[in-house]
């Protein structure tokens, strides 16, 4: 299973609103990060050109800011979009 990171799933405005709500429920919450993650169920390993093409197709939206990941809890919510 190939796993590729995608664009942020929520805008900075929406994240700020969610952090405010979450902090009201749990004061230890200091931040939130959302992003799409793409999974490709492959029958074989991709050739370099195929991998490059797939990564280009899945590059969209705002860029992910480079930052160090802080220690803390992580929650993953997955949605499947089967055509």
Image (cartoon, grey):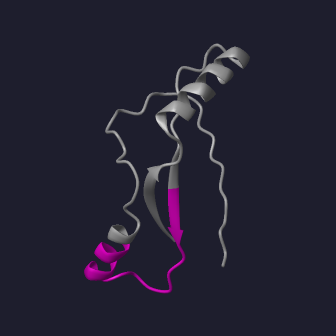
Residue found at x 44% / y 52%: 7
- Return the residue nearer the eye: 23 or 46: 23
Q: Position of residue 66 (x, y in %)?
A: 31, 39
Q: Quadrant of the C terminus?
A: bottom right
Q: Position of residue 25 (x, y in %)?
A: 73, 18
Q: Is 71 within the magenta?
A: no
Residue at point 61%, 16% (across, down): 28
Residue at the right extreme, as displayed: 25
Taking 56 as reference, is 74 left or right? right
Question: How many callouts does the rendering have?
Answer: 0
- The percent position of residue 24, horizontal first and vertical second, equals 69, 15
- Work out whether 61 lies above or below 66: below
Residue at the spot x=54%, y=77% of the render? 41
Which residues lie in the magenta part? Answer: 37-54
In which quadrant of the rendered view does residue 68 lie?
top left
What x and y, as percent, mark residue 73?
A: 59, 31
In this view, the residue in front, 8 or 73, is: 8
Considering depth in this image, is 23 or 4 the residue closer to the camera?
A: 23
Residue farthest along the bottom direction in this orientation: 43
């Amino acid at each position: 299973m190939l796993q590729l990171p995608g664009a942020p799933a929520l805008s900075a405005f929406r994240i700020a609103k969610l952090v405010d709500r979450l902090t009201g429920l749990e004061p230890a919450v200091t931040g939130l990060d959302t992003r799409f993650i793409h999974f490709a169920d492959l029958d074989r390993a991709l050739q370099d050109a195929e991998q490059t093409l797939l990564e280009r197709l899945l590059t969209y939206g705002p860029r992910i800011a480079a930052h160090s990941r802080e220690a803390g809890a992580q929650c993953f919510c997955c949605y499947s979009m089967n055509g």
